[in-house]
Image (cartoon, helix red, strand yellow):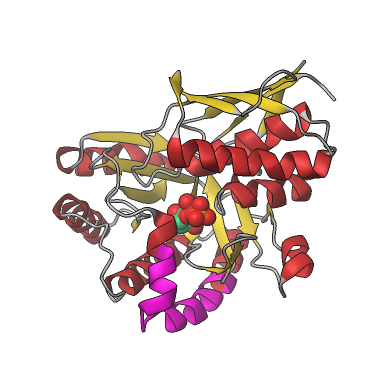
Amino acid sequence: AARGASAVAHPNIALIKYWGKRDEQLMLPVTDSLSMTLDVFPTTTHVRLDQDAAEDRAALNGEEATGETLRRITAFLDLVRARAGSSVRAVVDTRNTVPTGAGLASSASGFAALATAAAAAYGLRLDAAGLSRLARRGSGSASRSVFSSFALWHAGTGTGEEGDTSSYAEPVPAADSLDAALVIAVVNAGEKAVSSREAMRRTVQTSPLYGPWAASSRDDLADMRSALVRGDLKAVGEIAERNALGMHATMLAARPAVRYLSPATVTVLDRVLKLRQDGVLAYATMDAGPNVKVLCRRADAADVADAVRDAAGTVVTARPGPGARLLAEG
Ligand code: DP6
């Protein structure tokens, strides 16, 4: 095995959401999900094996990780070590350029980069689906950041080994003519009140709307796949927006309610509606935080950004981006 490796991965934004696990240990989701990997906010991770260390260590943007963050990284490395037949500890150095915990999916780029670097450092030979399955164990959405552009994460079937083997992401075809941009309105880059992990658990266990949303998500996914192949951005946007609003409805109906959307979120949603009334294709999607990602044509991205700028702190325009990539070994 190499003594170290580094990798880079980008966040992805789900157009058909992952919200709810059927197995928390194996990180198996209830539904299939579909995302666009972005070309902004990369995470770069270096994993170095340390023969002499008794514990794993990790630094995030130069700051030593402790508590739950370190526990998640160690648990993930334990999986890699079990597969590699190794007991050697690692030193992980991660740099990410996305605000952590703001619903901008830093765990997706983070675990996709960590999976890629750790697999190489420990000498695991994994194909893309195998890497996606591994990344999934760190954070579900990370399974999709292994791939560029549009990716579909299969919920898989069954439990145990069967579930684990059948749940991975893969690229989904989209028409070359599909000219998508995502304008990200960062309305609040602070830490979120409830982690997505806890929020999705509560939603599955207590929301009366969860079952109906999961069922309708299956139809959304089929419609989305055909809209992507047709290159029909209007349909892609409509489906993404209804799927995301439905997901937030399931959380609002949880007991106690989980509400990520803030007044600034709603202001941005009003602007998106106004853009549509003015004939601009613009559709919104929100994750486990108040930020809004507006799907639009590349040519309209500057106008969309202008329309939401006063309601948001920061506005960043993203395009479909690359999959996770090994940078160096040794
Ligand atoms: C709202 O992948 O962060 O962004 O699997 O518990 O780590 P864990 O959750 P995570 O959840 C992402 C939820 C979402 C929707 C999505 O990305 O599909």
Residue for point 29% across, 35% down: 315
Identify the image quadrant of the C terminus: top right
From the top left corner, tell me how far across and down residue 314 is, in percent: 26, 33
The one nearer the camera, 85 or 180, is 85
Q: Give the camera-side residue of 237 and 79.
A: 79
Question: Residue at horizontal 58%, vertical 60%?
Answer: 228
In the rendered image, residue 34, in percent from the top left (x then y), is placed at 56, 59
| Position above or below: 158 against 172 | below
- Percent across and percent down for residue 65 are 46, 29
| Position of 233 relative to 106 (above/below) | below
Most extreme residue toward the top is 330
Check residue 308 for magenta coloring: no
Extreme-front residue of the structure: 54
Q: Overall secondary structure of the magenta stretch?
A: helix
| Quadrant where the N terminus is found in the figure | top right
* Above or below, 118 relative to 91: below
Give the left or right position of residue 320, taking residue 7 as reference.
left
242 and 106: which one is in front? 106
How many marks are shown on the rendered structure? 0
Nearest the eye: 193 or 295? 193
Residue that appears at 23% across and 41% down: 188
193 relative to 78 in the view: left or right: left
Q: Any magenta on residue 201?
A: yes
Q: Is residue 126 visible?
A: no
Residue 249 in the image, given as x and y percentages of width and height: 31, 72
What is the span of residues highlighted in magenta in the rendered image? 200-222
Picture quadrant where residue 25 is located: bottom right
Q: Is residue 12 visible?
A: yes
Q: In the image, 12: left or right of 291?
A: right
Q: Residue at x 78, y 31 (%)?
A: 122
Residue 122 higher or lower than 286, as above or below:
above
